[in-house]
Image (tube, helix red, strand yellow):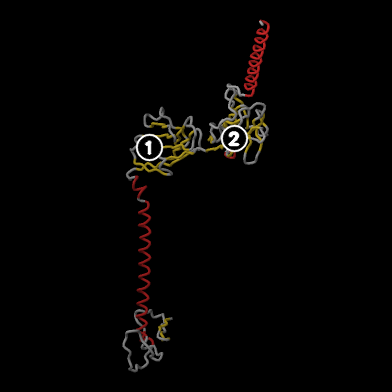
């Protein structure tokens, strides 16, 4: 009896052990199919799989650089793996660099790799205006993935307000303001010239003062106190990153600069009006002369011997026969004696020769 119970217990125990082993096996199989909790998500927000390279879209897509300086275009690539990064010029699809190797013969192009931030930076040395345009950072995936960066090359300009000529009174203060535009960075220095001589506060005896204001547009102000006639001439503003700008200053004695600057247009109008008056007078004189000539001709008409056909409009026609007279008697003071006048009637109009 004891042996039977022992055998039954062993069978039940074996069944329990087998069931437990089967459960453990099933759990291990399910865990093998499940994703580990520490693995990255299947897709990144940019739409690429977690184990494929992708671009950092926070990098700037528009770069502005100063002509003659180095331009830097950045491209960050994550999970690059065994792929390579190349920079391509978009306008002619010319390969500039592959990795850190410069592929083009133009050695102004160079790529450097910053491992700590996974950034591939294309450097263009001594950038020129022709370098402006779109550049592509490409990853050698299938298909190729690219990130576009637009490069703008600006040429700073300098302008002096009030040019090209400025008129001031003797003894007043000359205020010249030079504005530097389109410069991504302020100039390192700005020189002022009078004629071909550099101006300096130290050698001016306190009559010169310079002031520089740096903001979006850099301004350099030159003040000359108690202006004298010797201060007339050409003044030039020469920033370190732009071409030179010039203005010509005229120091006047006994004349108001406002009259020189603002009355130029009224003077031109007055001159034009004067010419108009002269033209009107000439035309009026010519009309009066023609009227006088016509009146004199009408006086000669009755004694011209041409048949006595017609007379001026509004004049009373005479039926009386006038005997021919000597042509010398028909001359009038209106016509010189050396001039002969023949007047005839042709269809009601008068022809004078």
Q: Report whether 299 appears left or right of 40.
A: left
Mark 1 or mark 2: which comes first in sequence? 2
Q: Report whether 117 appears left or right of 232.
A: right
What quarter of the picture does the N terminus occupy? Answer: top right
Q: Quadrant of residue 254?
A: top left
Residue, far front: 1
Q: Quadrant of residue 164?
A: top left
Q: Which residue is mark 1?
A: 175
Residue 234 position in % (x across, y down) = 44, 40
Question: Residue sitting at 37 percent across and 76 percent down?
Answer: 290
Q: So how many labels did they put on this image?
A: 2
What quarter of the picture does the C terminus occupy? Answer: bottom left
Closer to the camera, 184 or 234? 184
Closer to the camera, 158 or 4? 4
Question: Residue sitting at 59 percent across and 35 percent down?
Answer: 147
Q: Residues within 10 Å of mark 2 (few under 14, many from 20)?
A: many
Are the residues tagged 1 and 2 within 8 Å (C-beta)? Answer: no
Tell me the mark number nearer the camera, choosing from 1 and 2.
2
Closer to the camera, 320 or 90? 90
Question: Residue sitting at 64 percent across and 24 percent down?
Answer: 33
Q: Residues within 10 Å of mark 1 (few under 14, many from 20)?
A: some
Residue 105 position in % (x across, y down) = 68, 34
Residue 315 position in % (x across, y down) = 32, 85
For label 1, the SS is strand
Q: Is residue 176 above or below residue 269?
A: above
Residue 70 position in % (x across, y down) = 57, 31
Q: Which mark is residue 147?
A: 2
Closer to the camera, 2 or 83? 2
Residue, far top: 2
Mark 1–mark 2 distance (CA, rounded to whole Å): 50 Å
For label 2, the SS is strand
Q: Which mark is residue 13?
A: none
């Amino acid at each position: 009896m004891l042996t039977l119970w022992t055998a039954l217990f062993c069978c039940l125990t074996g069944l329990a052990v087998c069931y437990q082993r089967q459960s453990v096996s099933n759990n291990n199989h399910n865990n093998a199919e499940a994703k580990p909790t520490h693995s990255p998500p299947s897709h990144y927000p940019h739409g690429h799989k977690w184990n494929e390279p992708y671009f950092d879209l926070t990098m700037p897509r528009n770069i502005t650089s100063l002509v003659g300086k180095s331009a830097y275009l950045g491209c960050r690539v994550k999970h690059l793996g065994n792929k390579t990064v190349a920079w391509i010029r978009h306008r002619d699809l010319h390969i500039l660099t592959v990795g850190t190797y410069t592929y083009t013969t133009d050695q102004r192009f160079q790529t450097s790799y910053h491992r700590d931030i996974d950034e591939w930076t294309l450097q263009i040395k001594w950038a020129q205006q022709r370098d402006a345009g779109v550049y592509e950072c490409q990853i050698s995936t299938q298909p190729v993935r690219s990130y576009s960066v637009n490069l703008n090359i600006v040429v700073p300009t300098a302008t002096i307000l009030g040019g090209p000529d400025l008129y001031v009174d003797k003894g007043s203060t000359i205020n010249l303001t030079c504005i530097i535009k389109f410069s991504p960075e302020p100039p390192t220095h700005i020189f002022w010239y009078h004629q071909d001589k550099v101006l300096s506060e130290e050698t001016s005896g306190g009559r010169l003062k310079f002031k520089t204001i740096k903001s979006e547009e850099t301004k350099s102000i030159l003040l000359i106190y108690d202006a004298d006639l010797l201060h007339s001439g050409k003044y030039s503003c020469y920033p370190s990153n732009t071409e030179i700008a010039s203005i010509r200053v005229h120091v006047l004695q006994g004349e108001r600069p406002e009259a020189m600057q603002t009355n130029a247009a009224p003077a031109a109008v007055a001159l034009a009006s004067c010419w108009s008056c002269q033209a009107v007078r000439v035309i009026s004189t010519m009309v009066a002369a023609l009227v006088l000539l016509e009146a004199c001709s009408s006086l000669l008409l009755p004694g011209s011997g041409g048949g006595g056909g017609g007379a001026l409009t509004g004049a009373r026609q005479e039926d009386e026969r006038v005997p021919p007279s000597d042509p010398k008697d028909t001359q009038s003071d209106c016509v010189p004696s050396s001039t002969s006048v023949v007047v005839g009637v042709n269809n009601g109009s008068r022809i004078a020769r």
